[in-house]
Amino acid sequence: MDTNLTIIASFEVEFRKARWAAERAIEQVSDADLHAPRTDFLTTDGNKPGRDRDAELMVLRLSRTDLLAL
């Protein structure tokens, strides 16, 4: 097999593994837990300059079905 095809096939296998793991993780959380307002909660208190808490409530959030369809 061509080296490029081998590399592409390897990426595809790894992508499918990662997607499978992500889908299993999504199944384990409630819909309310699918959105985290903080990205670095272990190192900061969440009060970032420029953070617009009111706007966070207006963000379109994907449903579980929509998220799994990505």
Image: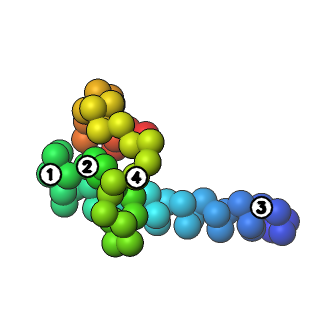
Residue at image coords 44%, 42%: 50
Residue 40 image point, x, y percent: 39, 64
Q: Are marks 4 and 1 in contact (CB under 8 Å)?
A: no
Instruction: Tell us which disc is closer to us: 3 or 4.
Output: 4
Q: Are marks 3 and 1 in contact (CB under 8 Å)?
A: no
Q: State the residue position of label 4.
A: 48
Residue at image coords 36%, 37%: 52
Residue 40 lies left or right of residue 53; in this view the side is right
Give whichever of discs 3 and 4 has the lower sequence position. 3
Q: Are marks 1 and 2 in contact (CB under 8 Å)?
A: yes
Q: Quadrant of the C terminus?
A: top left
Q: State the residue position of label 2.
A: 34
Give the distance between the C-alpha atoms of the residues marked 2 and 4, in whole angstroms: 21 Å
**Residue sticking out furthest to the front:** 49
Name the element at disc 3: helix
Which amino acid does the dot numbered 2 rest on? Answer: Leu
Residue at image coords 20%, 52%: 33
Give the distance between the C-alpha atoms of the residues marked 4 and 1, in whole angstroms: 26 Å
24, 37: nearer the viewer: 37
Q: Which mark is residue 66?
A: none
Give the distance between the C-alpha atoms of the residues marked 3 and 4, in whole angstroms: 45 Å
Give the distance between the C-alpha atoms of the residues marked 3 and 2, in whole angstroms: 36 Å
- The 10 Å Cα crowd at callout 1, few under 14, some 14 to 19, many 20 or more, is few
Q: State the residue position of label 3.
A: 5
Task: Examine the image and state in which quarter residue 67 appears.
Answer: top left
Name the element at disc 4: loop
Q: Which mark is residue 30?
A: 1
